[in-house]
Image (cartoon, rainbow, N blue to C red):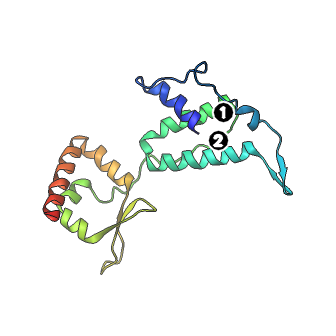
Amino acid sequence: ETDLRLRIHSAQIESMTRPNPLRQPTHDLAAFLNMRPLRVLGKLIDIKEKVAAYLDATFYNLTAITSHDWKTYAEMRNLAYDKFGLTLIESYLPTGTLDQGLDVLEIMRNIHVFVARYSYHLHTQVFLERPGQNKYVHSIGIQQVANSIRTHGMGIMNTTVNYTYQFLARKLA
């Protein structure tokens, strides 16, 4: 993973130095990946399959967390195929949603209500409404925030951050 990441990022980011195989020795990992499955304690272990499963899970999770980097992970998948012969699965995460859900402007206008009613669920990376008298529980995740930013434009970010900072400063003072 680190080798793929360094090679892709060094090609994308101009200020990043590219790996020099003459100064930094590289390890030929393809030889390990092309080995036949090993029998260890009566179990067959296919290194290539294990590495592919790890990279699939990692790229999927990272794409789900930072969906704007999907292209980087797609390039890393292609490089893994070219360099190591690994056939990785595409993530096929949805690029949009039909339900816009809560709007960033609405949250900003009523931030005191949002703070009182919502909790952050660390595992799923979503704000969930605390159970109350409502029949339904509302949630807002990364995709809804991204949709809202696309709708209102990037100019909303500075205003939202400043407004939230002022709210926190008042609460913590």
Q: Position of residue 119 (x, y in %)?
A: 33, 68
Specify the quadrant of the image occupied by residue 157.
top left
Q: Are marks 1 and 2 in contact (CB under 8 Å)?
A: yes
Front residue of 96/142: it is 142
Left or right: residue 151 compared with residue 23: left
In this image, 134 relative to 160: left or right?
right
Of residue 148 and residue 39, the one placed in the foreground of this image is 39
CA neighbours of label 1 inside 10 A, class few (<14), some (14 to 19), many (20+): some
Callout 1, which amino acid? Tyr
Residue at point 49%, 46% (across, down): 63
Residue under label 2, please give it: 88
Q: Nearer the viewer, residue 135 or 165?
A: 165
Q: Which mark is residue 6?
A: none
Image location (x, y in percent) of residue 106: 21, 58
Quadrant showing the N terminus: top right
Q: Quadrant of residue 126?
A: bottom left
Q: Amino acid at mark 2?
A: Leu
Front residue of 21/72: it is 21
In which quadrant will I find the C terminus? bottom left
Reply above or below: 8 against 143: above
Residue 172 percent across, percent down from the top left = 17, 63
Q: Secondary structure at mark 2?
A: loop
- Residue that sits furthest to the top in the current view: 22
The label on residue 81 is: 1
